[in-house]
Amino acid sequence: MFTPVHTSLGALLLYQSSSSLLLHNGSVFGVSSLLSGFMLRPSRDNVPIIAGLLSSVIPIYLLMPSLLPTYPAAPSSWGSILSTIGTGFLLGWGTKNGRGCTSGHMLCGISRLSPRSFIATAIFFTTAMLTANFVSDIPPCPTDIPCYTPIYPSSSELGFILGATAITFLTNTFIVPKTMARSELSRSMFSYLAGIQFGTGLFVSGMADPVKVLRFFAFLTDPARFDPSLALVILFGLLPSLITYLSVKPGQNTNQSKGKQAKPTLAETWRLPTATVADIDWLFVAGAVVFGIAWGLRGVCPGPAVLRSVLQPKWGLAEMAGYMLGNLI
């Protein structure tokens, strides 16, 4: 069902975490590359963020379990296990060769006005939409009313979401700049916090729910199954990120021109992607297409896959095995 309040506030959490990682640590919140590094090349750059993502399950599970998605059944037969491994393989191979996913390209890349990210997003979003409508079976809503009918949070849910949003804003805007020194330890600590914030945003916005994602694609063939919630991620997640980037104008070295922030709050240098449209090759295009197919088949991209792996370990074991294999090939 359409969740305008949940998704709007969840998108603000996604914006706060991803933009603050850029402003404080000087790096981009690209979950696919962070997850690949965590699994294959663990470092202080990726382990704290993925650990934070994993930890975000705890407060939701203990304090507001109503925000947890109702996942499809975990694989229980060899056929379903192999199918899950196959989808994980597509996800891993696609994001590796497409150089990113919904977070790195769509949320962070488009907000930095990256032409490569515009191209990648157009490819994988179109592919996912076509796959969801013509290959997947998009579930209908469990009631007789259309999926675009709005529902609103309970008072307890609203209190939790508003509290999480306020704490995130105060932490990232005031506490971190005023209390944390520029050091590796500070960067690692904030990476962990940003991971928790981002994971909470995925739960609250509904992006962690694969069924909700698939219903967002349904406008193409079945308007009654269309849930427009995730369009609000563009309004309250991507647009504020764009405004922040244009206001701060972060660069890639310390010799900044007038009007640019000289350094990240907690790091010595900016670490932004440097590839351009000239670096696009057939593997980049193929990777974006394959990622779009994986996203359209199951409604899961790397960030939500991390969260689901905690809540549904059998699924996560098969999905992550396929993801690692896709990254190795």
Image: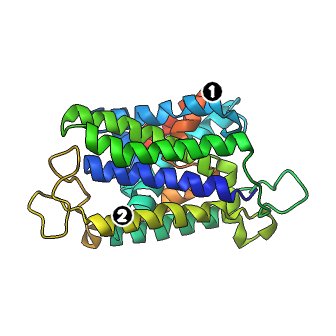
Q: Residue at x 19, y 62 (%)?
A: 251
Picture quarter with the C terminus = top left
Percent x, y for residue 225? 78, 62
Asked whether, in this view, residue 30 is left or right of residue 141, the answer is left
Q: Residue at x 52, y 47 (%)?
A: 165
Mark 2–mark 1 contact, CB under 8 Å? no
Q: Residue at x 77, y 53 (%)?
A: 139
**Looking at the rendering, which quadrant does residue 252 occupy?**
bottom left
Q: Amino acid at mark 1?
A: Leu
Asked whether, in this view, residue 135 is left or right of residue 150, the answer is left
Which of 104/230 is in front? Answer: 230
**Looking at the rendering, which quadrant does residue 257 occupy?**
bottom left
Query: Is 110 rendered above or below residue 287?
Result: below
How many neighbours does mark 2 have within 10 angstroms: few (below 14), some (14-19), or many (20 or more)?
some
The tally of labels here is 2
| Mark earlier in primary sequence (2, 1) | 1
Mark 2, secondary structure of its residue = helix
Q: Amino acid at mark 2?
A: Thr
Which of 212/199 is in front? Answer: 199
Picture quarter with the N terminus = bottom right
Which of 77/160 is in front? Answer: 160
Percent x, y for residue 140? 81, 56
Percent x, y for residue 106? 45, 62
- Is residue 111 visible in the rendered image? The answer is no
Mark linked to residue 244: 2
How many neighbours does mark 1 have within 10 angstroms: few (below 14), some (14-19), or many (20 or more)?
few
Asked whether, in this view, residue 248 is left or right of residue 17, the answer is left
Q: Dot 1 corresponds to which residue? A: 62
Q: Residue at x 11, y 57 (%)?
A: 254
Q: CA distance from mark 2 to mark 1?
A: 33 Å
Mark 1, secondary structure of its residue = helix
Percent x, y for residue 262? 15, 58
